[in-house]
Image (spheres, helix red, strand yellow):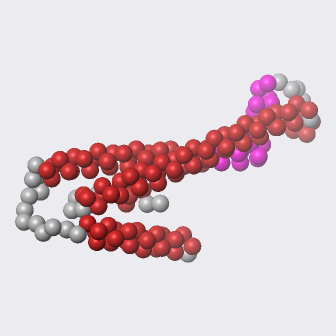
């Protein structure tokens, strides 16, 4: 996903940009929902790992070289276990991905506001000059073709 490219607006193609806006909002809304679900699952996994370790430490303190079992010792021992560290790292990564997706949705929403303001400026002839009517269908098709090319290039980079 190229967040920065999707947020950019071509001021010479406001009509095409408006056609693309709902698709972008849906795309990034789905991504945000998926990453939220992934984050929630990672948090749940972290809590399960913590509960399992807590139980195991209390049942087998000698396995963890604990002489005296206290709440603070159990809590500290949990934090030192590799499975807890791994689950914690997965949760941190999932949280980061969700936050990035959430900010992307906000950026796409801000893009809508920018488009509205550019259209207002256009309506006030802010960009006035000699013009030739554009073929919106051709502009739309060209943009879609470019997106496919960009997607193929991005996939090739990820593979290699």
Vertically, is 17 above or below 71? below
| 40 and 120: which is toward the camera | 120
Q: Is residue 84 magenta?
A: yes
Image quarter of residue 67: top right
Q: Is residue 113 left or right of residue 41?
A: left
Q: Is residue 100 magenta?
A: no
Q: Is residue 12 left or right of residue 159?
A: left
Vertically, is 70 above or below 106? above
**Residue drawn at (88%, 26%) of the image:** 68
| 125 and 97: which is toward the camera | 125
Point out the residue furthest to the top here.
70
Image quarter of residue 103: top left
**Residue drawn at (77%, 46%) of the image:** 83
Pinpoint residue 81: horizontal percent, then vertical percent.
Answer: 78, 43
Please report the bounds of the magenta region as a residue range: 71-91
Does any portion of residue 100 appear in the rendered image? no
Does any portion of residue 2 appear in the rendered image? yes
Q: Is residue 58 left or right of residue 131?
A: right
Pinpoint residue 32: horizontal percent, then vertical percent.
Answer: 51, 47
Q: Is residue 16 left or right of residue 150?
A: left
Pinpoint residue 127: horizontal percent, then vertical percent.
Answer: 12, 57
Quadrant of the snapshot with the C terminus = bottom right
| 86 and 145: which is toward the camera | 145
Pinpoint residue 128: horizontal percent, then vertical percent.
Answer: 8, 58
């Amino acid at each position: 996903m190229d967040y920065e490219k999707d947020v950019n607006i071509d001021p010479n193609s406001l009509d095409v940009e408006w056609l693309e806006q709902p698709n972008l909002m849906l795309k990034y809304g789905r991504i945000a929902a998926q990453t939220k679900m992934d984050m929630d699952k990672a948090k749940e996994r972290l809590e399960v790992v913590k509960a399992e370790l807590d139980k195991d430490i209390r049942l087998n303190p000698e396995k963890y070289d604990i002489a005296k079992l206290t709440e603070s010792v159990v809590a500290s021992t949990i934090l030192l276990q590799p499975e807890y560290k791994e689950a914690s790292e997965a949760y941190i990564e999932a949280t980061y991905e969700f936050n990035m997706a959430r900010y992307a949705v906000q950026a796409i929403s801000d893009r809508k506001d920018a488009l509205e303001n550019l259209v207002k400026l256009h309506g006030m002839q802010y960009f006035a000059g000699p013009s030739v009517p554009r073929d919106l269908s051709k502009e739309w098709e060209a943009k879609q073709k470019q997106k496919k090319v960009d997607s193929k290039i991005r996939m090739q980079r990820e593979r290699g």
